[in-house]
Image (tube, rainbow, N blue to C red):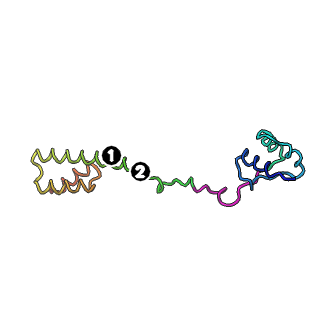
Amino acid sequence: MNLKKKKDLAARTLKVGKGRVMFVDSRLEDIKEALTKQDVRDLKEDGAIVVKEIKGRRKVDKRKNKRGPGKIKKKVKTRKQDYVIMTRKLRRYVAEMKKQGLLSPEEIKDIRNKIRNKIFRSKAHLKQYIEGLRK
């Protein structure tokens, strides 16, 4: 007897491939009478339809789920916002120092170039660098 349509129905209903659907030989008459998806689900519960396990590595190791620290990338927008905030903060501080007359024009030019090239991690790092210039 040809149960190809029943196998297709079972695969669709159980959300697996046709190759994984197996019919138990002793229950073929019951399977032949199944018409609806609910009938197929009931037959699976009774054990007339068996779904094979997945073969190979896919079962052991879902490769999509590898999300270690090396795989996670920050969005460009976040990096740019961080850069803009830090740059403005440091430039404001340098302008303040310039107003007080604590830095020469050459030093200001050098510091502003370094700010632009992201040499300084923080305002504290910039202060430390300026102290080093004075010594």
The residues bearing labels 2 and 1 have C-alpha atoms spaced at a distance of: 12 Å
**Mark linked to residue 74:** 2
The image shows residue 131 at horizontal and vertical percentages of: 18, 53
Left or right of 32, for residue 21: left
Say which residue label 1 marks. Answer: 81
Magenta residue check for 55:
yes
Q: Residues within 10 Å of mark 1 (few under 14, many from 20)?
A: few
Q: Residue furthest bottom?
A: 56
Pointer 2 and pointer 1: residues touching (CB < 8 Å)? no
Residue shown at 85% from the left, 51% from the top: 24
Where does the C terminus fall, quadrant-wise? bottom left
In magenta segment, residue 81? no
Q: Earlier in the sequence, mark 2 or mark 1?
A: 2
Question: Horizontally, is 39 left or right of 63 in the view?
Answer: right
Where is residue 18 shown, x and y percent of the image?
A: 74, 53
74 left or right, relative to 105: right
**In-front residue for pair 110/37:** 37
Which secondary structure, mark 1? helix
Residue 105 occupies quadrant: bottom left
In magenta, the rendered stretch is: 51-63
Label drawn at residue 50:
none
- The secondary element bearing badge 2 is classed as loop
Q: How many callouts does the rendering have? A: 2
The residue positioned 15% from the left and 46% from the top of the image is: 95
The disc labelled 1 sits on which kind of residue?
Gln
Q: Closer to the camera, 23 or 125?
A: 23
Q: Nearer the viewer, residue 87 or 12?
A: 12
Residue 72 lies left or right of residue 106; in this view the side is: right
Residue type highlighted by circle 2: Lys
> Looking at the picture, how far across and down is residue 103, in whole percent?
12, 51
Residue that appears at 14% across and 56% down: 107
